[in-house]
Amino acid sequence: MRIVIATGNPHKVDEIRAVLAPMGFAVVSLSELGRPVPAEPDEPGSTFEENARIKARYYAAALGEAVLADDSGLEVDALQGAPGVHSAYWAGTEGSRADRDARNNAKLVGSMRGIPVEQRGARFVCTMCIATPDGMVHIETRGEFDGVIADEPRGAHGFGYDPYLWLPERGMTSAELSPDEKNAMSHRGRAVRRLAYLLIHKRISW
Ligand code: IMP
């Protein structure tokens, strides 16, 4: 079964494909479609679920086939859940993805300065949604990945806030996990495995 993933983030494509490809799903990203693709829609939702739904419906209608969209971000308890749905552009929209990640991480460090370790709880959240061109939403899943915000970055894998999500039970950050280890524990890994389970075992199709 072919699944188009509505994201331009190559890290997300790799993480999702690593789970779905071995199960026999042909995962195709927007840039691999080989035809013009509309620009990303606005994501005005106040929840990850809403934004994933908006993206999945928008691209399914534009492309004329079923689309899987994901929305994700970081929720920090001491910041009342911020940056949340604003995670990608928290410190501004300018520059490359790497520039934005660096500015976001600097803002995170500044916002957390002086906050004691027992109040540094946080989690990555990922929601996934499959929609068809008629606007129907067929599957929605959610995964979470709990940790603690570190005050120094560690690790070179992953992307975004990974170097700052400390995993106490592993004694390392999310960016120090290998791609397979991250997928086994992460918000995206959990959401995509649940989605695969529903596709296969509940015989959900369109
Ligand atoms: P989205 O493209 O709207 O889902 O934006 C997600 C943003 O949340 C990314 O740009 C990152 O800043 C952050 N984020 C989501 N998932 C991860 C992850 O697995 N590691 C690190 N940062 C993440």
Image: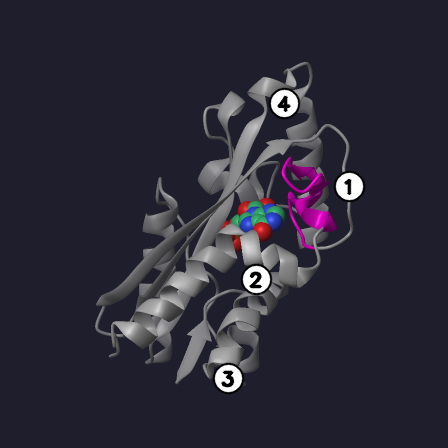
Label 1, residues with CA under 10 Å away: few <14, some 14-19, many ≥20: some
Q: What separation in Å lies between label 4 and label 3 (alpha carbons)?
A: 42 Å
Question: What's the residue type where badge 2 is placed?
Answer: Lys
Helix, strand or loop under label 1? loop
Circle 2: element type: helix
Distance from mark 3 CB to nearest ligand 1 atom below 8 Å? no
The disc labelled 4 sits on which kind of residue? Ser
Residue plotted at (58% across, 64% down)? 15
Q: In the image, is the residue at mark 2 within 8 Å of ligand 1 by its beta carbon? A: yes
172 left or right of 34 in image: right
- The residue to which callout 4 is attached is 111
* Residue linked to disc 2: 12
What residue did someone put label 3 on? Answer: 35
Q: State yes or no: discs 1 and 2 in contact (Cβ < 8 Å).
A: no
Separation of disc 2 and disc 4 at Cα? Answer: 26 Å
Dot placed on the residue nearer the N-terminal end, 3 or 2:
2
